[in-house]
Image (tube, rainbow, N blue to C red):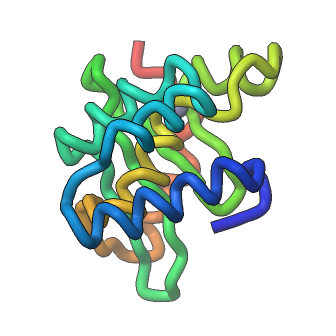
Amino acid sequence: MDSTLPAVAEELLKKIKKVFQETSHVPDNLLLGLKFIFGPSALPALDLVDQRSVTRVTSPSGRTAYQVLGSSGKLYTCYSSCHFCTCPAFGFTVLQKSESLLCKHILAVYLSQAMGACQELTVSEEQLSSILLAEEEDEG
Ligand SMILES: [Zn+2]
């Protein structure tokens, strides 16, 4: 992981990982902690994890990106290494207004890592590049 999250958030994710490995369950007190730290992103992020919406995309050279299938059916690309997501909410509430630490997609990536719930996809370097470059693509 990285240093873009406050220590308390990293601690919480570590705790969730540990408890989840032992019990396959996230207890209420940790859920409350998630809601407290991440606000309205917490529950939608858990839903995304439940639905196995997070895919870790890896290339042969070891480059990694995450793709998260949003609730609207749109696929967003998240870079956990640099704490960035291509969704509008990230640009607006995180970057412009600094209201949130992260969007539900990045939180879903962190939670999927903690809970071992990532789907795995291996692609070629070319395919990964096109995923990374497609971030500004307008599908409308
Ligand atoms: Zn997002």
Q: Can residue 15 be seen in the rendering of this structure?
A: yes
Up the image or down, 4 lies above or below 21; here it is: above
Q: Residue furthest front?
A: 29
Q: Is residue 95 left or right of residue 66?
A: right
Q: Determine the image quadrant of residue 93.
A: top right
Q: Residue at x 52, y 42 (%)?
A: 106
Residue 4 at x, y = what percent? 77, 53
The quarter of the displayed image where residue 29 is located: top left
Q: Position of residue 76 (x, y in %)?
A: 44, 37
As drawn, the residue found furthest toward the bottom would be 61
The spot of residue 82 in percent (x, y) is: 71, 56
How far across and how far down the image is residue 31, in percent?
40, 36
Locate the C terminus and report the quarter of the image it occupies: top left
Residue 98 vertical position relative to residue 59 in the rendered view, above or below: above
Q: Which residue is drawn at the image coordinates 44% and 55% (left, top)?
A: 66
Residue at 57% x, 34% y: name it: 86
Residue 137 seen in this snapshot = no
Q: How many marks?
A: 0
Give whichever of 88, 1 is nearer the camera: 1
* 62 vs 69: above or below: below
Q: Quadrant of the N terminus?
A: bottom right
User: Observer-nearest residue: 38 or 28?
Assistant: 28
- Left or right of 85 in this view: 100: right
